[in-house]
Amino acid sequence: MTIQEMQDEIIEDFAIFDNYMDKYEYIIELSDELAHFDNKYKIPLNQIPGCQSRVWLDAKYINGKIIFTADSDAIITKGIIALLIKVLSNRTPEEILKTKLFFIDKIGLRENLSPTRANGLVSMIKKINAYAVAYKN
């Protein structure tokens, strides 16, 4: 599935909810989709600065694609990073860097986050892009 198709699918998934509390519950459910994140990767280098909660992101470069794993000590934040990973993991650095993450605004995520969580979202995206820049050929 392409990045575009994945974002469209997320928009469809969120369209069934009438209010943002239901969307928050769904985001919390998405946190369960994250692969296990080994505690040995919960190091300062992997921690994303600027987040209200603690968030760790690790990346492996395998066969030309970046595989992301992440964890957070807050379930909503964990769900948000799960959404980003769903869209951007297992992609080439070039794909990641040219992606416009339109689903964030289409599902109303940015406008319904507290200012500190919104800053955290921006920090997560910056960290993902930094990995893509580092792994770009």
Image: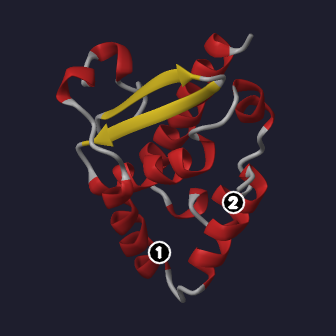
Image height of 136 relative to 50, above or below: above
Tell me the quadrant of the picture where the N terminus can be found: bottom right
Residue 58, by quadrant, is top left
Q: Name, please, the residue furthest toward the front.
A: 63
Position of residue 55 in the picture relative to residue 95 (left or right): left
Residue type, numbered disc 1: Lys
Q: Identify the residue at image location x=61%, y=23%.
A: 63
Is residue 13 or residue 18 the one in the foreground? 13
Image height of 126 relative to 113, above or below: above
Query: Element at badge 1?
Result: helix
Q: Earlier in the sequence, mark 2 or mark 1?
A: 2
- Whole-Å distance between the Cαs marked 2 and 1? 16 Å
Is residue 48 or residue 94 the one in the foreground? 94
Residue 35, how many percent across, how many down? Answer: 34, 46
Residue 102, how many percent across, how many down? Answer: 74, 55
Tell me the quadrant of the picture where the C terminus can be found: top right
Residue receiving disc 2 = 7
Residue 81, how many percent across, how many down? Answer: 45, 46
Query: Element at badge 2?
Result: helix
Position of residue 11 in the picture relative to residue 52 (left or right): right
Residue receiving disc 1 = 23
Residue 121 seen in render: yes
Residue 51, by quadrant, is top left
Residue 52 seen in render: no
Q: Name, please, the residue furthest toward the left.
A: 39
